[in-house]
Amino acid sequence: MNARRLWTVARLELVQRARTSRWPLVLGAWFVIIGLVTFASWRAVRESNISSGPSLYDVTTFFVLALGMLVVPSLTATTVNGDREHGVLATVQTTLVTSWELVLGKLLASWLVSLCFLATALPFLAWAWIEGGLSIGRVFLSLLVLVLVLAVVAAVGLMFSTLTARPVASAVLTYLTLAALVFGSLITFLLGAVLLTDSVTVRVNGVPESYWAAQTEPPVEGAEPPANGGIPQPTQADCDVFTRTQDVSRTDRLWPLLAVNPFVVVADAAPSRLADGGTFTGGFTPMRWISDGSRDAKAGPRDGDDVVDECSYLAPAGSTPNSSAMTDDAFERAQAARDAAALERRNAHPVWPWGLAFLVALGLVSVLVAERRVQTPVRRLPSGTRIA
């Protein structure tokens, strides 16, 4: 393989697309759109007590990935059969360019175009980091994963471009494949979560049924209904550890369906939701929500040895009856403890390494198939296919 010939193929592909399309206008419109969305997100959270960095980062990354999933297939799904349809491919194949150089050159060109959208969004990602609440290491990790996902999308489109004779057919097949990864995996997971259930016994630190039975008083005829039904609100002193049998969805058996979703892979590699102060960051953070949901799905139901705490928000022991409200400090401490426990459980069940491994394997298989389809001499071509 010759790197110079490979780059020549990529450069010709880039020059051809630059002459036949309005990429400067597209990139300019994209810069304006992502700028408006980022500014709106910043205005929405700037007056609150939460950091605006995570919201800005999530919105920008989400838009870059979504646009990449829409634009990249249109670049690669027509690159080989389009050249064959115009009689250009055979001319290139008669030169010293090998099949690997041809495929990788076209893949590199499409990948570089998709990275232009990411480069256009870099100022807004830098803005998000300046706003705070983000770890620079996790930012680079999620960007690396995003770059690899865009390369996989380009490889899938390139494969279908070599498998079909018509550009329209290859574009449709590419979009259907991506739709299956994004929407099909999610729909299948949700259906499986409803159908695949199991009865489990969990340990609960909460108010037992015996407390409510002991507090129930027979009604007095003609008397006004007492406040709170005459039952004093429990405190933490009334809590006890008991077992409870309940039906749960076995999402721990279905999580691979989420791992193949490109949005889940990028979201799960995004910066952690836990801020330096030990509390969760708020705002509109779709990537964090996706990550939390996928990791909770992989973790599945709690083990029998885990205790579900339902008393952390009750008034402390020694409080007067019906004083169910906690003080602000006690509430914040309870919330911080629950957040830390949830984060520890989620950190033990990452999803993105498995999903990234699957997507990289899919990309490698796509490149291998594309290379075999452009090898010469061609033994069989679809009817009506133009050679030169």
Image (tube, helix red, strand yellow):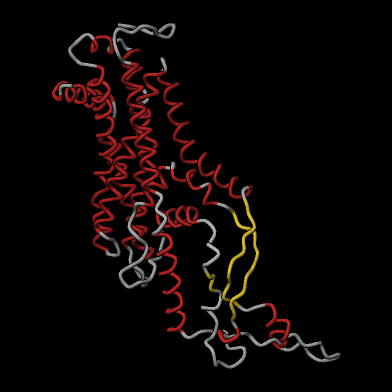
Q: Residue furthest left?
A: 4
Residue 123 horizontal/vertical position (percent): 23, 51
Query: x and y percent of residue 132 in the render?
Result: 27, 64
Count of marks, rendered view: 0
Above or below residue 162? Residue 213 is below
Residue 219: x percent and y percent?
81, 87
Horizontal side of residue 382 vs 304, given as left or right: left
Q: Which of the two residues, 134 or 206, is positioned nearer the viewer here?
A: 206
Q: Quadrant of residue 116?
A: top left
Q: Quadrant of residue 211?
A: bottom right
Which of the two residues, 357 or 165, is positioned nearer the viewer here? 357
Against 190, residue 11 (above or below) is above
Q: Is residue 78 left or right of residue 308?
A: left
| Quarter the C terminus occupies | top left
Query: As displayed, is residue 324 above or below residue 274?
Result: below
Hey, which residue is sitting farthest front in the picture? 305
On the image, the x and y values in percent for residue 182 come to 46, 41
Residue closest to the eye, 17 or 265 = 265
